[in-house]
Image: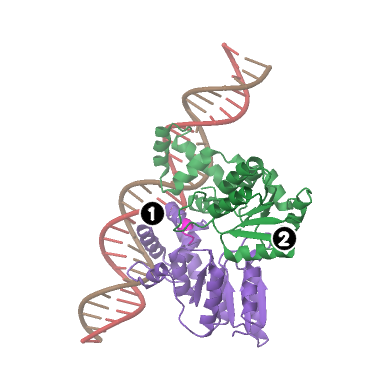
Chain colours: A green, B purple, C brown, D red
Amino acid sequence: MFKKVLVAEDLDSISISIVKVLEELAILEIHHAKYCDDAFLKIKKGLHNSTPYDLLISDLSFKPDHRENRFSSGEELIEAAKKLQPDLKTIVFSIEDKSFRIKSLFNNLEINAYVSKGRNSIPILKKTIQRIYNNEEVKLSAELSLALRDNSLFEIESYDIALLKSLSKGSTLDNISSEFKESGIVPNGSSSLEKRINKLKIYFKANNNVHLIAITKDLGLV
Amino acid sequence: MFKKVLVAEDLDSISISIVKVLEELAILEIHHAKYCDDAFLKIKKGLHNSTPYDLLISDLSFKPDHRENRFSSGEELIEAAKKLQPDLKTIVFSIEDKSFRIKSLFNNLEINAYVSKGRNSIPILKKTIQRIYNNEEVKLSAELSLALRDNSLFEIESYDIALLKSLSKGSTLDNISSEFKESGIVPNGSSSLEKRINKLKIYFKANNNVHLIAITKDLGLV
DNA sequence: AGTGTTTTTACGGTTTATCGTAAGGATATG
DNA sequence: CATATCCTTACGATAAACCGTAAAAACACT
């Protein structure tokens, strides 16, 4: 099994459970950092002392507080860590479930696995650690692999996002029409905006603009 | 110490830590529910068997999944639970840090304590449980106690939340008027609803209903 | 009961959203 | 080049939101 593992997780209520899993797997050296910066320094130090980490388990979002930090997200930490130590195995353990974000983790950061925090995630995390150690292929949950393949959300273009964002800022259709004309965004006739919003309302099954913004806010689109 | 405690928390990575705390406090009966509905049924059953819970520790937000649920948030669960068992002690353990929302928990749901999930929250949770058991006053963070004491500001009541929720579901004012009449919520004249929404718009500096919902969504009020 | 105050509701006018229809323009295709 | 098709814009009618004012009801106080 892995000898030396680093956990990057700000919430103590979660890191305790992760450490417990690692103990159950009889991992000798378990280190834990509550800030991305601390995690990065530990990795650096490990390399410097010729006792590098075998595995990094990292969260994505970290609560900001009084401390000034160089890295503010798991993505930034992993990117920096991989530059320093390209062979470092990485598992992301996060509540994030937006498929485009998870996709980019595999594609851009070349993480080894993604485990979603959920109702039964600790056993999955445990199994995933074992699989990574054995160089087995990591299975994605049915739900997640579906999400990764699902392109439906990507039909929504940046045009739609801009439109929804303007709406959510309280602009009227006529206002948005003027805004778009100034920014050179087309189409910008208020009638076209109307039609586009109507398509979005049908797509998201929204009764009216208020409903539409509530739904897309929930989806994290705006 | 408390005899029988219920934990309502969907993430297993967190509930494990909470249960551990309860074990350290030598609590005999520790029950755990991953869904609000399950938690509610357990409370109901406890009352029915004359073995009611002494304490409820609940999260606020629960991941939606395939299951159809009657209650989808900690607020709804606590509201229903308190109707059933008004003397039930309640601690909310959540990552929420908007003072509005926390304030409304104390004022509208009369929770006993609020513990914010953070980098050092497990020891705080432990101490809080002991304080509640001893009927000691629970200390709040400076920021939070300020927000709670401040009554000069506009009070966001459960009425406003209900109103905003209906709006965000796409109902028209006339619809909401009818809904409120059926539910016995007063005032319910469409003109009164209009006035109340207008107050909210002034308070939150919103241009229109769409803007208002976008803002309150961001604040986590709805 | 009577008076003043606050809350709730009703009403009318204006703006914006909503919905259907149609005209104008660009592009593709034969 | 002619025609079809799609995209964009315009227009008009109705519903809903928006805003101010005033009546009605509920409440508090003497």
**Residue B219 part of the magenta segment:** yes
Residue A204 visible to an observer of this rendering: no
Residue B184 visible to an observer of this rendering: yes
Q: Nearer the viewer, residue B147 or A84?
A: A84
Based on the displayed image, in which of its 4 quarters is residue B43 positioned? bottom right
- Read off the chain for label 2: A
Based on the displayed image, in which of its 4 quarters is residue C3 positioned? bottom left
Q: At which x and y percent is residue B8?
A: 62, 71
Would you say B32 lies left or right of B141 here?
Answer: right
Where does the magenta region start and end? B216-220
Q: Vertical placement of B128 versus C11: above or below? A: below
Give the residue number, with chain letter if any, for mark 2: A27
Instruction: Give, as a three-letter code, the residue at label 1.
Output: Ala
- Read off the chain for label 1: B
Q: Which of A103 and D21 is in front in this view?
A: A103
Q: What element carries label 1?
A: loop
What's the distance in space between the residues labelled 2 and 1, CA to CA?
54 Å
Q: At which x and y percent is residue A28?
A: 71, 61
For mark 2, does the 10 Å Cα neighbourhood hold few (<14), some (14 to 19), or many (20 or more) residues? some
Q: At which x and y percent is residue B204?
A: 38, 58
Q: Which of B98 and B170 is in front in this view?
A: B98
Residue at the extreme front = A49
Q: At which x and y percent is residue A203?
A: 59, 46
Q: Is mark 2 on a helix, strand or loop?
A: loop
Q: Nearer the viewer, residue C22 or A17?
A: A17
Give the residue number, with chain letter if any, for mark 1: B206
Q: Which residue is drawn at 68% across and 54% down?
A: A115
Whether marks 2 and 1 lie on the same chain: no
Q: Which residue is drawn at 68% across and 86% down?
A: B49
